[in-house]
Image (tube, rainbow, N blue to C red):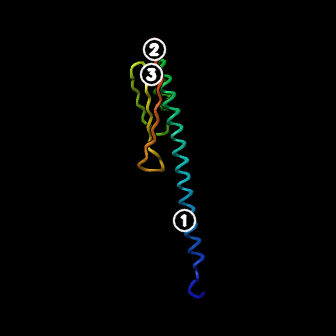
Amino acid sequence: MIGERGATTVEAAFAIAALMVVLLLCVAGLTALSMQVRCIDAAREAARLAARGDDGDAMQAAHDIAPFGARLQMQEEGDYVVAAVSAHSLLLPGITIRAEAVAAREPGAR
């Protein structure tokens, strides 16, 4: 018992550090999930507006909805408009979150 003095304090310090790491990973995961939902929403809205012929509104809507620093790519593939939104994760370096949406171009829209 004499040599175990302070062992409880060390164990508590390790336990608190482990809990903080788990908490940080949970927050990072929830942040990434939120960013994914925002990328999906931005891509869907941009594709829908571009399919109607509102390209300027599509870019603005995607910019408003997407996470900070997200990139939007729009391209036409035949009678379809494809919108892709990608953003780098804020808390998970090296992770890129990406979403795509496709919408059929409406007749008469260009």
- The residue under label 2 is 109
What is the secondary structure assignment of the residue under circle 1? helix
In terms of sequence position, does the residue under pointer 1 or pointer 2 come before the other? 1
User: What residue type is disc 2 on?
Assistant: Ala
How many tags in the picture? 3
Q: Name which residue lies at 42% across and 18% down.
A: 79
What is the secondary structure assignment of the residue under circle 3? helix
Q: Nearer the viewer, mark 3 or mark 2?
A: 2
Question: Where in the figure is residue 72, as x and y percent of width and height?
Answer: 42, 32
Q: Name which residue lies at 57% across and 62% down.
A: 19
- The residue under label 1 is 17
User: What residue type is disc 3 on?
Assistant: Asp
Q: In this view, does 80 lie above or below 85?
A: above
Q: Is residue 69 visible?
A: no
Q: Quadrant of residue 14?
A: bottom right
Cα distance between the residues tagged 1 and 2: 57 Å
Question: Where in the figure is residue 5, as x and y percent of width and height?
Answer: 58, 83
Quadrant where the N terminus lies?
bottom right
Q: Is residue 5 visible?
A: yes
